[in-house]
Image: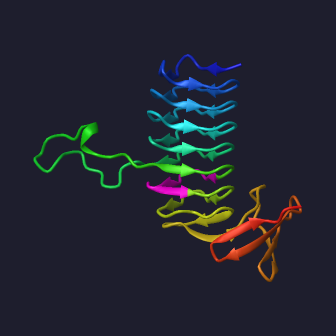
Amino acid sequence: MTRIHPTADVAESAHIGSGSSIWHYAQVREGVVLGENVIVGRGAYVGTGVSVGNNCKIQNYALVYEPAILEDGVFIGPAVILTNDQYPRAINVDGTIKSGSDWEATGVIIREGASIGAGSVCIAPLVIGRWALVAAGSTVVKDVPDFALVAGVPAKRIRWVGKAGVPLTDEGAGTYLCPKTGARYVERSPNTLVEVEK
């Protein structure tokens, strides 16, 4: 069952998947596609044509500007901002106010299972890899590898994390262990970690 709070502003052309919930004062714009079991929190904004996969959470007051793409299982923390303008200006060089045709939107792509911590800003264009974790309050200005834990301003990789989101234990020789699930990972290069198949 889909739940849309009476105070939410959801465009008629938005597709809302089964089991999804859109809460108080959230806005979901034209052409948005929300997958199944998506939660859009209070006061969140999902821009025109944004694509959101299944089982995603967009927490309170997050701003997801078009043309962002969120794959399945993505977590967007409270007050996160996904930008879409590399060279923002309110006016053109002749002093006239910019319109939608005066700039080209660029998006943030967030791959399966990744999480963006509260208050973080992701500056488009960039890709955040599968199961990556952006620490709260970070500013992300370049692509984030799969399974990377990044933090800071600008965000830099400080650890590796597994699918459970827990920092991995370094076992030496480029191998890592998830202390929560027992899954093992191998570092193929300084920017590439892969899960060992069972």
Q: Nearer the viewer, residue 128 or 21?
A: 128
Q: Quadrant of the N terminus?
A: top right
- Magenta part of the chain: 115-127
Residue 20: give x, y in percent of width and height.
Answer: 66, 27
User: Which residue: 53% across, 66% down?
Assistant: 155
Q: Nearer the viewer, residue 100 or 164?
A: 100
Q: Which quadrant of the structure image shows residue 128?
A: bottom right
Q: Quadrant of the C terminus?
A: bottom right
Is residue 173 located in the magenta-colored stretch of the structure?
Answer: no
User: Which residue: 52% across, 19% down?
Assistant: 7
Is residue 124 located in the magenta-colored stretch of the structure?
Answer: yes
Q: Nearer the viewer, residue 177 or 25?
A: 177
Q: Is residue 174 above or below residue 164?
A: below
196 relative to 9 in the view: left or right: right
Residue 117: give x, y in percent of width and height.
Answer: 61, 53
Residue 121: give x, y in percent of width and height.
Answer: 49, 54
